[in-house]
Image (tube, rainbow, N blue to C red):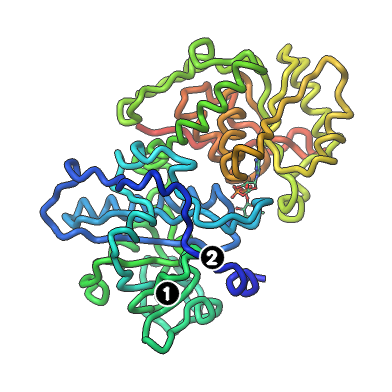
């Protein structure tokens, strides 16, 4: 399936957002004398939007470490697209459609891939990360070694007659790289920094690291994890769309909910007083999650029973439902509710692409008062919980989970609290 997608969907360079063609690197702020270096990366095709956001945080911290060591690295943002969860297959979508680039730039300098191409910069080196063929051994040691390419690396890039390497490159068919190597690695953002400064690669000006999800966070949940996370503010357009919806249907706004944010995330301070709006928020993950986590999820009827009980207990009659469920499952869920319960969803697929709807869903389901109940181990859910930590909600209203029918008092999710 992977090969089929790789082979079939190479698209011409996108014209998305051509009118916004400005570099987002604040050259005044990042005017270190050292030569500029560019880090590009990509992630395994099968990973979803929110896992990819997690990988961004790992790579952003690599760039932070490189810059702290005096090197002038800039992160080139990998265009979004070809996500197998998206119902509409789109490619080459820029980050500004989803995130606030000014905010990202306050953590490390970033630029869109289109802007990188506009500067006519070549890609000197692709490094394809892979695990060690022999496994981890008896203990986990941070290390990397240049190794022969293991499947599927050997089929993802090919050397053409002109000696250049071609691959997926986010669907841009005129992009190529001068060199290609496979590296077995086990480690984290710091290990990747060591790899990029290793003598084999240190002379390269622009390096693309493929399969970047292979590296982990250096210190999961520490202050730099949260800085990278807090810098990932959503695009103002999407937040505004969610705010209009909140106001119209959910009787919710930032002033009353105590969820106002300072313009610059670096000025945020710890708080636990956010109230949220008078509705219940649920992230109800379905589709492929049913195969992956079948035993951990409630049935449709079971979900309805949990929600009804909770609304009764909290004296709420509105639910915001964020879900990837097919329409017939949503209708079945709604059919179990009495007339007094109203279920709201944001579904403007004309105006917004699938990833944008997912973000609007996240904004709406992170701002209710007494949120619930997230789908077990979904990274979509994790991102909502993190956003509630950033907004300053009490812990008890955030880290909850939908239990399966036969285990009503199931284990609740770990409480990854924000650190400043
Ligand atoms: O975001 P994500 O990595 O979370 O992948 P998981 C799930 C994708 O499904 C999202 C869609 O990026 C959306 O495209 N989706 C899920 C939703 N829930 C919603 C929702 O409430 N609203 C909207 N609009 N869209 C993992 C994947 O997904 O699940 C793995 O990363 C694998 O690749 C595994 O598929 C089973 O962590 O939930």
Q: Is residue 192 visible?
A: yes
Q: Position of residue 410 (x, y in %)?
A: 72, 37
Q: Quadrant of the N terminus?
A: bottom right
Q: Is residue 321 above or below residue 228?
A: above
Q: Position of residue 84 (x, y in %)?
A: 64, 57
| Residue labelled with disc 1 | 184
Q: Is residue 406 visible?
A: no
Q: 128 or 344, which lies in front?
A: 344
1 or 2: tag closer to the N-terminus = 2
Cα distance between the residues tagged 1 and 2: 30 Å
Left or right relative to 369: residue 290: right
The picture quadrant where one finds residue 81 is bottom right
Residue at 72% x, 35% y is 402
Mark 1, mark 2: which one is toward the viewer? 2
Residue at 54% x, 51% y is 51
Q: Position of residue 197 (x, y in %)?
A: 24, 67
Q: Residue furthest left?
A: 33
| Residue labelled with disc 2 | 11
Residue at 68% x, 51% y is 87
Q: Quadrant of the C terminus?
A: top left
């Amino acid at each position: 399936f992977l090969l089929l997608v790789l082979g079939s969907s190479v698209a011409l360079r996108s014209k998305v957002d051509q009118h916004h063609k400005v570099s987002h690197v604040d050259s005044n702020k990042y005017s270190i004398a050292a030569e500029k270096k560019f880090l590009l990366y990509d992630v395994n095709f099968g990973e979803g939007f929110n896992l990819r956001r997690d990988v961004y945080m790992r790579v952003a911290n690599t760039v932070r470490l490189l810059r702290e060591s005096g090197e002038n690295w800039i992160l080139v943002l990998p265009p979004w697209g070809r996500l197998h969860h998206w119902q509409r297959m789109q490619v080459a979508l820029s980050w500004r459609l989803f995130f606030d680039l000014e905010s990202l730039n306050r953590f490390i300098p970033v630029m869109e891939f289109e802007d990188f191409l506009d500067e006519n910069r070549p890609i000197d080196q692709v490094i394809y990360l892979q695990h060690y063929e022999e496994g981890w051994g008896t203990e986990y040691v941070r290390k990397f070694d240049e190794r022969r390419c293991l499947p599927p690396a050997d089929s993802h890039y090919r050397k053409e007659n002109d000696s250049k390497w071609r691959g997926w490159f986010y669907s841009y068919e005129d992009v190529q790289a001068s060199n290609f190597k496979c590296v077995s690695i086990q480690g984290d953002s710091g290990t990747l920094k060591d790899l990029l400064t290793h003598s084999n690669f240190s002379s390269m000006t622009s390096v693309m690291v493929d399969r970047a999800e292979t590296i982990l966070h250096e210190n999961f949940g520490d202050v730099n994890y949260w800085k990278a996370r807090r810098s990932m503010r959503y695009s103002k357009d999407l937040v505004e769309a969610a705010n209009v919806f909140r106001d119209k249907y959910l009787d919710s706004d930032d002033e009353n909910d105590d969820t106002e944010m300072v313009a610059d995330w670096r000025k945020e301070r710890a708080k636990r007083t956010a109230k949220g709006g008078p509705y219940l928020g649920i992230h109800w993950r379905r589709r492929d999650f049913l195969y992956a986590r079948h035993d951990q999820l409630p049935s449709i009827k079971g979900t309805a029973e949990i929600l009804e009980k909770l609304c009764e207990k909290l004296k709420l009659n509105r639910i915001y439902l964020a879900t990837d469920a097919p329409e017939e499952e949503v209708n079945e869920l709604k059919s179990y509710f009495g007339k007094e319960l109203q279920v709201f969803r944001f579904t403007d697929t004309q105006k917004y692409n699938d990833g944008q709807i997912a973000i609007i869903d996240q904004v709406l389901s992170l701002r209710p008062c007494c949120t619930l109940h997230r789908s077990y181990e979904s990274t979509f859910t994790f991102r909502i919980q993190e956003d509630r930590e950033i907004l300053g909600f009490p812990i008890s209203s955030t880290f909850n989970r939908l239990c399966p029918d036969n285990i009503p008092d199931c284990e609740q999710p770990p409480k990854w609290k924000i650190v400043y």
